Amino acid sequence: MKLVNVTPDMIPLNKPLPFALRSAEGVLLANKGYVIRSASELDHMVGLGVSLNIDESDHQREYVGKLHAMLRREVSLGVIADAHITAGDLTKRVVGDDPDADWLDFLGRANALLRDPQKATFQKLLNSLHRDISQQAQRNPDATLLALMHLSATELRSYSAMHAMLVCVTAELAAMYVLNWPQEMVDTLGRVALTMNISMTSMQDELAIQTLPLTATQKHLIEVHAAFSSEILKDLGVTDPVWIEAVFHHLDKTPGPLAARTPTMRIARLIQRANLFTAMLAPRASREPMQPGVAMQACYFDENHDVDEAGAALIKVLGIYTPGSYVRLATQEVAVVVRRGANTTTPRVAVLVNRQGMPTAEPMFRDTSQKDYRIVATVPHRDIKVKLSLERLLAMV
């Protein structure tokens, strides 16, 4: 019997269970057809440290997948409770679907492309990489954010490519789900994010592990890299003027509403905000990542200390505690954020270290909107002694 972990908010209330619920050890908790009357009944189970699981089968796996998709679309719980699998659901697959995305492969492709771009293949390889990343972000944004945040803290030697991918995903999510930009504009946004630093990929990787102050040469390259990157893209055969100009302006710090800007400058502004926010959250050899609240404030307010429309869109879609970040709860448990919550401050988390400071045998899921499990502090990645593989983290989403 192979068990699949499920979270309490995936369990229908006041409806017969379409599957049997089991503990992580396979012990039967509730038979198929059993009716769970209230959320408190589930919370009681989880509060006792019980991990909720189902026996994997084709039917059950598709059911869980369907629930995940509905949750991501914020479908009401009443509709979710009535969800059922049709014969078509059991055979239908999304074209190009890859539920087990290889993020290290994506990172390797991005790193190779940005470090050694070849004119004959550059745009084809970039479009392929962008398509794969964007498909995963749309299919499962929480898993995508968790993977990228985890890699940004562990893959410093490929920092530049990692940062480009993270900016690409965060900016695209804000553009699609908050700003409602057309798809063509979102696609250009993603290409700009992936290539904005192409002129200093190697140096950016060096800076991530450098402990000494910037040299004069490094400072100069940082100052001119936006213009240099746009020239490199032209040399590589890029002819899209919006792409070229947005890269050129991606560091511009001009406040004001997005509506007053051209499409090119809207893209540049959203990139600038995403670049700022994600860079602050990423660790460096020379400094610790900033607290999420500090990074949020820097992104949320513009140069005139007014609310920045692009920054606010990022905060709304990402939340203050992005999947992949670590937090301490009121219970003194330490947890990893695995899913964004109903608002920006109440994500779903998985406890990795219990209140006695010991690693948990299995992750225990908590809803931080509940007072007893509220977040009281963030925890730096370096302070997490429980070392988890990316595969195990993604299994929690």
Image (cartoon, rainbow, N blue to C red):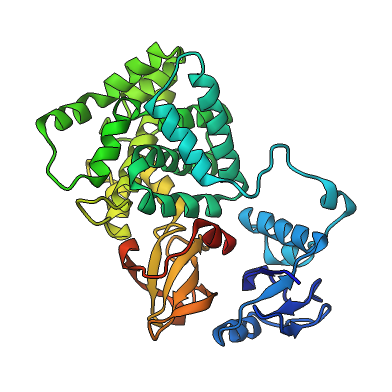
Please count the marks in the image.
Answer: 0
Q: Position of residue 58 (x, y in %)?
A: 81, 59
Considering the image in quadrants, where does the C terminus appear? Answer: bottom right
Residue sitting at the far right:
87
Q: Which of these two is toward me, 16 or 23?
A: 23
Q: Position of residue 226 (x, y in %)?
A: 29, 25
Name the image quarter holding residue 247: top left
Residue drawn 40% across and 84% down? 355
Considering the image in quadrants, where does the N terminus appear? Answer: bottom right
Q: Which of these two is toward me, 76 or 69?
A: 69
Residue drawn 44% across and 18% down? 118
Does 89 appear above or below 253?
below
Name the image quarter holding residue 165: top left
Does 223 appear above or below 158?
above
Q: Position of residue 358 (x, y in %)?
A: 41, 81
Does 373 appear above or below 323?
below
Q: Which of these two is toward me, 218 or 69?
A: 218
